[in-house]
Structure formats: structure tokens, C-alpha cells
Image (tube, grey):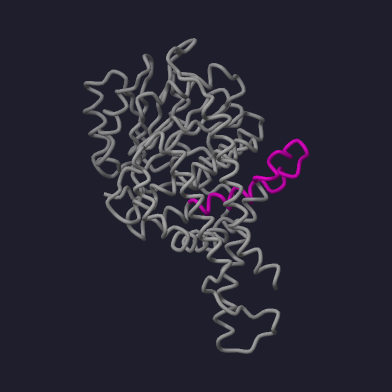
Amino acid sequence: MQPFYSFVFHYPLFMAFAMVFGGLIYHFFREKSNPQIDILPATPLVSVLIPCHNEEKCIEETIDFLMRQDYPDFEIITVNDASKDRTFEILQRIQKTNAKLRIINLTSNQGKGMGLTMAAMAAKGEYLVCIDADALLDPKAIRYFMWHFLNFPRVGAITGNPRVRNRTSILGKIQVGEFSSIVGMIKRTQRILGKVYTVSGVVAAFRKRALLSVGFWSTDMVTEDIDVSWKLQMRFWDVRYEPRVLCWILMPETLKGLWRQRLRWSQGGCEVIKKYFTMIFSWKQRRFWPLYLETVASVAWAYLFFLTVVIFFAGQFIDLPPNVVVRSIIPGWTGVILTIVCLFQLAVGLLVDSRFEPKIFRMFYWLIWYPMFYWMVNAAVTIFGFPRALFKKLGTPAIWESPDRGF
């Protein structure tokens, strides 16, 4: 059992070093060399797609903020997916004074994937920017997206840089650091390796021709953003990360809301493991192998971590073979090293993102709880999410509920 115990402790250590190393390489050799975008070679029409389901509290603010874009030609398409609140009424009122706004109204809940696909087919633009109904998009976001599309024809999708804006609770403050130090560093490292695990569903841009080549979004995946990222890259479209595309979002501030969100994310990742299991072994997809193996390893780590805890408590009541006994789950010197490395990763991530938020280092104090609390949550949701993905019937529509916005 010793190799399994070693994996439980050393896998997070290895990944932390990998994220720091890869993130810094991207930052110094790619991110800093990106030109400032003052003039684009062209400004074609861009369609901004916003799926909505019970968004009366935030949709008006999102559209108002969207109108500040420093880009001359764009339209807004909202998809009201059978909202039970006043979302549709608010959209109709806004449309009376906003000529850019178009509305698609669905009378039954079809799910985010279907809503985005319908909006994409109705869009007049070849380039699509997709944001959630609570997202406040930075005024230069479309301009940064279009620089990639216009200069690199193989770019099929670009993911932006979500920033958490509700910071009044401990959970909110921890997630501010998480998105900078964990999510941001992971995406930077994955870009160095050549394949991105997922675009951010809350802010991403797509070339419509690329989406058409893969059949748009899937309607039976609980995380349509992960699935479409894999579909595009398996058809050899380039998926990029643009950290300058800032998007201010709302995140859960309750344990229940956080659990539901992370469980959905975990189930979606496991569904991708299941869906692409046979395709991934193709030699043509060899650049996907590191990403796929890392995804599988993260699932294995969660179960082995859980097994380690179970064996420890079992050993308090029954005699176990010496090679199976777990003497303690309280971190010893290996746990101290792991914690220090994790905090180092968090500090580096905050330092890299301080160019966007100079005062973000104030959140470092709250991030000391990340290794203890969020690792437990991520392990737990994986344990519950993997069976849900494994036994989910293929083709089952993935309808949605309005997420916890932290109000």
C-alpha cells in the first residue's frame, strides 16, 4: 500500500510545482510579449450570446455593462430558457431602448447547451462571445478576443479570465485567490503543453465555423464548456487563454451552493473521461494524452485519499497488516512541505495576476485555508461525481437550474 500512500501525498506536490513552472514560463515568454491592441486589421460583426434562466436579479446590469464595449460592431442575443421569474419581461423592456438586443424565448427548459446552439445559429456574426447572465465583461474584452481570431485562422475558441466580484464572505475571498492562483495558473500551464482542459463557460469566444465543424454544443453534458473544448481540439482547432479578457462574476457564498457547483464541475469532467475514452488512444490525439492522464490521475487521487482516511479510522478499531496501517492523517513533515509549496503556488498566482488587480495580495491571508478546506471539497465532489457520470444514460438532456449567484 505504500506506493498508494506516496501518490496521495506527492501527486498534489508534483502538480503544484508543474503549475508554478508552467505558469511562469507562459507569463514571461508569452503573456508579457503580447502586443497592446490599439488597432485591429478589421472589425467584423461579433455576436454576444447570453443564456438566461431565472436571472431577473442580474441580467439588466450585465447588458448595461456590455454596452460599454470598446468595439464598434456587435449584437446581443439573449436566450430566455423557460425562466419562471421576470427575466423575459425585463429583456423585453430593455429591447425597447436597445437596438442591439435580440431575444430567443424558450417555453420549456432545454439546457444551456441547446440555448447556446440556437443562439449561435441565429447569430449574424461569424465570431461569438458567450458570457453568463451575471458576467460583467471588461470594455476591451471583444477587442482582445478578435485580435486572436483575425491574426490566427486556426484559433477556434478563446477563454477569458474570470474574476470573482463578491468578496464579503470567507468563501468568496478564498475563491478570489483560487481563480488567480489555481485556475489561472492551470490554464497558463496547459497552454504551454498545447491543450486546454476547458474554456470558462462564463466567458469564452468561438469561431462559428469551428463550432459548426463539431456540431456546436452537446445537449447531454452537464458541463457543455468542457465538452466543446475537447471536441474542438480533437478536430485540431486551437483553443487559447487570454488573461487580459477580464470578466467579473458572482460565485456561491454558501456551502450548499459551493457543493452543487463543484459537484457539477466534477461530474462534467468525469463525463468527458467516459465520452472520449476510446478516441483518446488514437495516435493523432497524442498531444491530448498528458491532459487525459492528468484528469484520470486527479480522479484516482480523490479515491485513494478517501481510502487512506477510511483505512486510518478502521485501524483504530481493528488490527490491520503492518503494510496497510496508516499511522496518522494529521500532516507530518510531508504535509508541512505540501502546504508550503501550495502557499508558494498561491503567492505566485497572485503575483502574476496583480497586473490586473494591484491589491489582490490582500487575499493571501484567506488563502491559507485553501489547502485544508478546498482539497477536501474537491476530493468529496469527485467521489460523488464520478459514479453519476459513469452511470448516466447517454443522450439524457442536461437541463439546468439557475446557479447560486451569491446574493
**78 up-or-down from 317: above or below:** above
Residue 218 on image: x %, y % = 54, 39
Q: Which residues are magenta?
A: 265-291
Residue 280 counted in the magenta span: yes
Q: In the shown orientation, is residue 215 left or right of residue 125?
A: right
- Furthest-right residue in this view: 283
**318 up-or-down from 113: above or below:** below
Task: Name the quadrant containing residue 337.
Answer: bottom right
Task: Name the quadrant containing residue 357.
Answer: top left
Which residue is depicted at the point 35% across and 55% down? Answer: 171
User: Which residue is more in the foreground, 397 or 401?
Assistant: 401
Which residue is depicted at the point 45% across and 13% down? Answer: 44
Q: In the shown orientation, is residue 20 left or right of residue 62?
A: right
- Furthest-top residue in this view: 41
Which residue is depicted at the point 28% across and 45% down? Answer: 84
Residue 231 on image: x %, y % = 61, 36
Residue 279 on image: x %, y % = 71, 43
**384 up-or-down from 208: above or below:** below
Residue 347 on image: x %, y % = 46, 48
Please state the total of marks drawn on the protein image. Answer: 0
> Split into 4 quadrants, where in the image is the N terminus?
bottom right
Task: Name the quadrant containing residue 89.
Answer: top left
Q: Main secondary structure of the magenta part?
A: helix
Residue 25 counted in the magenta span: no
Q: In the shown orientation, is residue 266 left or right of residue 64?
A: right
User: Which residue is more in the foreground, 63 or 32?
Assistant: 32
